[in-house]
């Protein structure tokens, strides 16, 4: 029937809503599947006609009653039956929404940070510590490194002072060795760099 009506389909959805619904469903199947329905209908028709012919040949009411008792085949194909794919898709969508909601509720992992204090010793009393401190704050920059805005000058010996400077660092981003090497790169100013305090925040 579907193949015979291809020239006039699709039907008008407003005038023939039921027919349009039937056409929408059946058109989703391949021609091979639709042909299998026709073969099944012919086979089912042949099974139904055989008992009727036998009853007609015998004649009488008994033959008619036996024909009426003949029940349709249980394995008839229903093109409108739900094959379960829609249910699976709906279940997958619900699972995805539940997972997304769970992620949103989960709290973000706090960023691990540390407060580190370095002491920077110069070569001698002639070293300009203010200039050295300014260079450290301006030129030693890394992602996850945040210097304190002030530094201290503390005496070492014989008129020599050192710089004590601190910074907050993100543990996963900043290596203390990298910071130390960056400060020691100011070779004209710096003799040594040491960590004097390391506290987790």
Image (cartoon, helix red, strand yellow):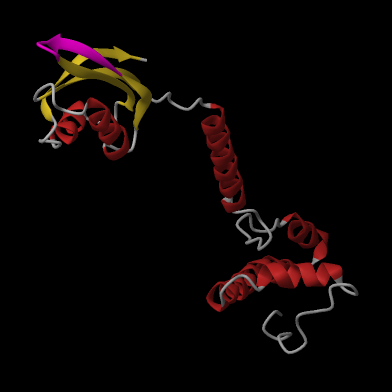
- What's the magenta region? 152-159
Q: Is residue 182 left or right of residue 34?
A: left
How many numbered marks have been drawn onto this rendered protein structure?
0
Residue 61 at x, y percent in the picture: 83, 60
Residue 97 at x, y percent in the picture: 58, 39
Q: Which quadrant would residue 36 be assigned to in this image?
A: bottom right
Q: Which residue is situated farthest in the bottom direction here?
A: 7
Residue drawn at 63 percent across, 54 percent down: 74
| Residue 94 appears in the rendering | yes
Q: Is residue 172 left or right of residue 188?
A: right
User: In this view of the protein, which residue sits in the foreground, 63 or 134?
Assistant: 134
| Residue 173 appears in the rendering | no
Q: Which quadrant would residue 69 be assigned to in this image?
A: bottom right
Determine if the magenta segment contains residue 153: yes
User: In this view of the protein, which residue sits in the foreground, 140 or 142?
Assistant: 140
| Magenta part, dominant SS | strand
Residue drawn at 66 percent across, 63 percent down: 79
Residue drawn at 14 percent across, 31 percent down: 189
Q: Vertical placement of 142 versus 126: above or below?
A: below
Q: In which quadrant will I find the C terminus?
A: top left
Q: Is residue 147 left or right of residue 78?
A: left
């Amino acid at each position: 029937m579907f193949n015979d009506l291809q020239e006039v389909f699709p039907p008008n959805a407003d005038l023939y809503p039921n027919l349009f619904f039937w056409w929408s469903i059946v058109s989703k199947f391949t021609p091979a599947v639709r042909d299998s329905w026709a073969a099944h209908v012919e086979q089912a028709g042949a099974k139904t006609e055989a008992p009727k012919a036998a009853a007609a040949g015998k004649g009488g009411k008994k033959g008619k009653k036996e024909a009426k008792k003949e029940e349709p085949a249980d394995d008839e194909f229903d093109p409108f039956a739900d094959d379960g794919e829609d249910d699976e898709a709906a279940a997958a969508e619900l699972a995805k929404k539940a997972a997304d909601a769970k992620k949103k509720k989960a709290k973000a992992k706090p960023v691990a940070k540390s407060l580190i204090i370095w002491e920077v010793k110069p070569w001698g009393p002639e070293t300009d510590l203010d200039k050295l401190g300014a260079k450290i704050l301006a030129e030693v920059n890394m992602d996850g490194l945040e210097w304190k805005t002030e530094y201290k000058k503390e005496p070492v010996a014989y008129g020599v002072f050192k710089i004590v400077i601190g910074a907050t660092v993100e543990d996963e981003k900043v290596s203390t060795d990298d910071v130390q090497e960056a400060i020691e790169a100011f070779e004209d100013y710096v003799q040594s760099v040491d960590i004097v305090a390391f506290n987790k925040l």
